[in-house]
Image (cartoon, rainbow, N blue to C red):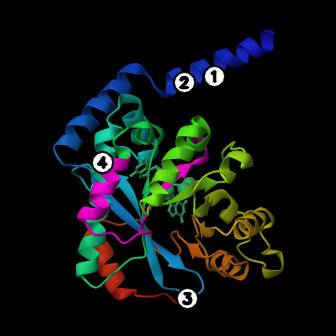
Amino acid sequence: RAKRNSARNYEFFLEEMEFDNRWRTDIINQLKNDFYEGHLSLWYQPQINLKTGAVCGIEALVRWPDSAGGFIQPPSIFIPLAEYSGLIIDIGDWILEEACRTFDKLKRQQHTLQSVCVNIGIPQFKQFNLIKTIQRLTQEYKLPAGTLVIEVTEQLAMHDPQLVIENLHTLQKLGVHAAIDDFGTGYSSLNTLRHLAIDRLKIDTQFIHEISHSNAEHARPPFAETLISLGQKLGLKLVAEGVETQAQANTLRQIGCHQGQGFFFAKPMPFDELLDWLNDNPSLSF
Ligand code: C2E
Ligand code: MG
Ligand code: MG
Ligand code: MG
């Protein structure tokens, strides 16, 4: 009993340290100002078809730049605070619109992407307007059915399974696809996942990094391979996250993973850089 109490106190202590109140309030206020003044930026990371080397899509990743060429906080810090404060609703709408606008701008430059992936958190998903917003944006920017892909985590799926099941079905009818992000890291029940209208799994970075860097004989990734064959049997598209080496890319291709995303191919970059990068790399050979 004593042990359990002290464990709980310790967790509480850690939480206090990490999310010290004043620090948290300061960040939220600064984020609010910067967002409404138009200082957030949406960056994009290409996704590569592992069979052909063609660029097939992008994932939109939000950035909070400072004036010196760096970042004020990474998304892993400010997204949870934006969610906690409710700011994520406005920020999330802006991210969705910016991503759809980017698809349209690229199309006008002869780069028609198969998919544009956007991360969606729990409060955004619970918001009544999300579906209406998505419907309006895909019409306004003329995204063909299947182009917009929303990425949800297993945590989100388990948070309110009934709502998630319903919303994903509605979105699927509107031609919006969905991916489970960081697949394999959450505590989701396969039974819940089974009922979700998803069309792809993003295999989490940690399982990709387990794939051997050097020795080809030991290059079999036991768990990534298991996740990939599970996804294949379910008829899902498989995307590997955090691909950093040639060996990982080769192994993933061999075991039938469809797409790869990671520093080995390209880092996330702002729109102008993405456009240059696409012009230089219509497809990759590796
Ligand atoms: P995520 O959706 O799993 O995004 C992948 C993260 O891995 C990104 O970090 C990306 O920059 C990083 N990454 C890409 N390739 C590699 C690689 O080869 N090696 C390694 N080590 N990392 C790689 P980022 O941009 O810092 O985002 C972190 C998380 O924050 C995202 O994880 C996502 O959950 C959240 N996030 C980012 N942008 C948004 C957004 O626009 N909206 C929402 N709701 N969440 C976002
Ligand atoms: Mg993601
Ligand atoms: Mg991920
Ligand atoms: Mg991840």
**Residue type of the residue flagged with mark 4:** Asp
Q: Position of residue 9 (x, y in %)?
A: 65, 15
Of the two numbered discs 3 and 1 in the rendering, the one whose residue sits closer to the viewer? 3
Type of residue at label 2? Glu
Say which mark, if any, is on residue 83. Answer: none
Quadrant where the N terminus sits is: top right
Residue 13: image location, x then y, percent:
58, 19
Marks 2,1: beta carbons within 8 A: yes
Q: Secondary structure at mark 3?
A: loop
Label 2, ligand 1: CB separation under 8 Å: no
Query: Looking at the image, which residue is at 28% across and 85% down?
Result: 110
**Mark 2 lies on residue:** 15
Report which residue position mark 1 lands on: 11
Question: How far separated are the C-alphas under marks 3 and 1?
Answer: 47 Å
Magenta-highlighted residues: 131-155
- The circle on residue 52 is 3
